[in-house]
Image (spheres, rainbow, N blue to C red):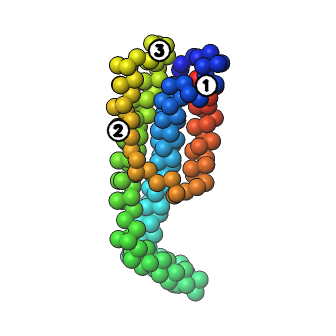
Amino acid sequence: MLIASNAEASNPNNAVWGVYDEFRTARLNVKYLEAEIRRLNRLNFWHEVVIAISTSSAVAGFSFWQTFFGGYLWTVIGGVAAILSILKPILKLQDQISKKQELLASYRVLDHDLIGFLLRLGIVRSTTTQFTDSFSGPLNARANSFNRTQGPALMSNSESSVEKRWNASCL
């Protein structure tokens, strides 16, 4: 990373701060989206498992289901599966996962471009017009459709993870 003097690093008007903030934002969004995709995949997996088990005639034939408790439990599983089957086209979990994966890919590209920019900036140790113009490419590719209102706890965990690893002392 760029090693700047304390005076330069503490100056919020330093041009590197803008790049560094964009990098941290991209890294935050990568972490958030990875966690969100994992959560949606788990939800989709269990959704499919419940539906598959409840529609399986092999599972329905277990002698356990013939007992009072088993019959009651099988009825509950069947009811849950029916509700999940109704909700499946409404929730569109696969569509949500696909959209978030596309967004994640764009943030990973942006993250990669910005870390490369910061590393080159550390080598050059100065900003020229040509060098700063190369920064406009990654900024133009920035994904603006990220919705921060979803999952405040996950966002908080992602923010603390990025802050811990990429705080101002890295400059």
Q: Residue furthest top?
A: 124
Examine the rendered structure and indicate whether residue 170 appears above or below residue 86: above
Amino acid type, mark 1? Asn
Amino acid type, mark 3? Ser
Location of residue 37 in the rendering, given as x and y in whole percent from the top left corner? 45, 51
Q: Does the image show residue 10?
A: yes
Examine the rendered structure and indicate whether residue 2 appears above or below residue 139: above
Amino acid type, mark 2? Ala
Looking at the image, which is closer to me, 42 or 14?
14
Dot placed on the residue nearer the N-terminal end, 2 or 3:
3
Q: Which residue is mark 1?
A: 11
Quarter of the image containing the C terminus?
top right
Looking at the image, which is closer to me, 127 or 106?
127
- Spatial CA span between label 1 and label 2: 27 Å
Q: Which residue is mark 2?
A: 141
Location of residue 58 in the rendering, given as x and y in whole percent from the top left corner? 40, 73
Residue drawn at point x = 53 percent, y = 20 percent? 1
Q: Secondary structure at mark 3?
A: loop
**Viewer-nearest of discs 2 and 3:** 3
Dot placed on the residue nearer the N-terminal end, 1 or 3:
1
Residue drawn at point x = 57 percent, y = 50 percent? 155
Location of residue 144 in the rendering, given as x and y in whole percent from the top left corner? 40, 47
**What crowding class fits label 1: few (fewer than 14 Cα within 10 Å), some (14-19), or many (20 or more)?**
few
**What crowding class fits label 3: few (fewer than 14 Cα within 10 Å), some (14-19), or many (20 or more)?**
few
**What crowding class fits label 2: few (fewer than 14 Cα within 10 Å), some (14-19), or many (20 or more)?**
few
- Spatial CA span between label 1 and label 3: 15 Å
Q: Which residue is mark 3?
A: 126
Tell me the number on the disc at residue 41: none
Q: Does the image show residue 60?
A: no
